[in-house]
Image: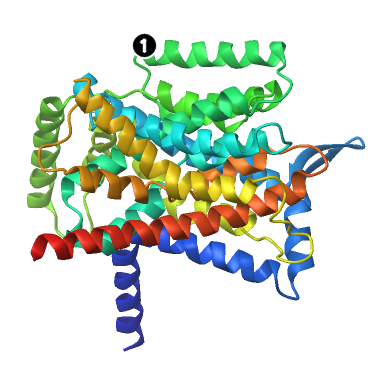
Amino acid sequence: MELQNNSGILETFKKLTKSESFAGVLLLCCAVLAMIAANSPLSEMYAALWKSKIGLDINGSFIGMSLGAWINDALMAFFFLVVGLEIKREVLFGELAGFKRAALPVIAALGGMVGPGLIYYALNAGTQSAHGFGIPMATDIAFALGVLSVLGKRVSISVKVFLVSLAVADDLGAIIVIAVFYSNGLSLSWLVVAAGIIVVLMVLNKMGVKALSLYMILGVFLWIAVHNSGIHATIAAVALAFTIPVSPKIDTLSFMEKMKVVVSHFQESEKRKDSVLLQSEQVEALHHLAQHKNAVQNPLVRLEHALAPYSSFLIMPIFAFANAGVTIGANIDFGIDYVFLGILCGLVLGKPIGIFTFTFLAEKLGIAARPQCVSWVEIFGAGALGGIGFTMSIFVTNLAFSGDHALVATDVAKISILIASFTAGILGSIFFFIRDKVCHH
């Protein structure tokens, strides 16, 4: 009975993890838990945890970082690797493949970055907080997908595809913004080392080397070089993703021929078998089967599928728990410049207005065209959901502020992101609920 219960729980968990909304729900739960921890009797312990040093002490010199830095710089590199792999796949084979298909979501994403960025900067120009213009620029795919799955059939497949491809293009834009505007004190020698490693990775790709382990090992050295160069270390993961090979070791036809040989050997051995144990030839056949199975898969897709669950269900929730906890007390000053208003207006108003305006202009100028079944009302609704900017916005917040007011501005920004993302999600949902009611009447 207990085994049945356990298997039932496991099946339910498997179904949950396969649902689009689960990653977003888990992320939200971790953010809420972080806020509870930061405003409970455990607040000092919570704050001290992320400052604790992890590393090696070699001859009196410490090599390592704080736990918070390990999460934000090293663990999040895997998140950015998955984002990079997703962007490359979409550009080569997906919704961003070819100018005509890519034009609309890329232009929409550009509008969704320019709109919020301009609103934030206009409100904070000339202040110490002006450098935070990149905070409201990003869209969180996990949260946006979560809201879309809750809305169900009220949102058409075309709108979902538009929003997801927009979010992927938006991620690429956010990566460029981080690399260009949020890098500190560039070291030319380390940049040369990083460039050299990228060249080696590109050469391996051109030579047809498919061993993912070799790319990942070189990726670690690339991360160290980029980390020391002054550019944010997670950019190394994106650069690595773009060098991962796409074509498999063997083509599908060769794989099918090899499978026929393996299966025939397995069947021949089965005829001679006199016990429940597999014959040595059968074990060998299974070994070849596993080898060929990996060889026929695209290295890029194989790596993305291997890492994506860890990114969605482990790395992002840990990042949310480590970064969303803000102690709401006397230290919170919502009057600090216009950080709160800049982020709130940027995500809630700037996103839909920017996405709608750029899409509208692109169609009127003949640069791109909407999918036939997507209305302007749905474009605006998708833009409203694009204002959910959790993970990447918090990531940029950690890089945006410096000086005396950095700590206060960072806390205000994080609360602003949570409020703005929640508001954008609610408004976007209401938008599609009303549109659905109107259309059915």
Looking at the picture, how far across and down is residue 367, in whole percent?
22, 20
- Residue 123, position as x, y percentages in the image: 60, 39
Q: Which residue is mark 1?
A: 206
The quarter of the picture where residue 230 lies is top right
Q: Nearer the viewer, residue 188 or 314?
A: 188
Residue in the image at 37% along x and 33% along y: 109
Q: Tell me which residue sits at (66%, 43%) in the image.
A: 398
Q: Is residue 271 left or right of residue 138?
A: left
Looking at the picture, how far across and down is residue 22, in whole percent?
Answer: 37, 62
112 up-or-down from 66: above or below: above
Residue shown at the point (14%, 58%) measured from the top left: 274
Can residue 281 be spotted in the picture?
A: no
Could you say which is closer to the camera, residue 346 or residue 138?
A: 346
Which three-letter amino acid code belongs to the residue tagged 1?
Lys
**Relative to residue 7, is residue 58 drawn left or right?**
right
- Residue 33 coordinates in the image, percent (x, y): 58, 68
From the viewer's perspective, is residue 150 above or below residue 117?
A: below
Judging depth in this view, the residue of 74 and 285 nearest the camera is: 74
The residue furthest right is 60
Q: Residues within 10 Å of mark 1 (few under 14, many from 20)?
A: few
Q: Is residue 253 among what the camera can see?
A: yes
Query: Which colour style is shown?
Result: rainbow
Q: With 295 as the anchor, is 394 left or right in this view?
A: right
Camera-side residue of 149 and 259? 149
Compared to 319, does 252 lie above or below? above
Task: State which quarter of the image contains the C terminus.
Answer: bottom left
Helix, strand or loop under label 1: helix
- Position of the N terminus, as image quadrant, is bottom left
Q: Is residue 202 above or below residue 336?
A: above
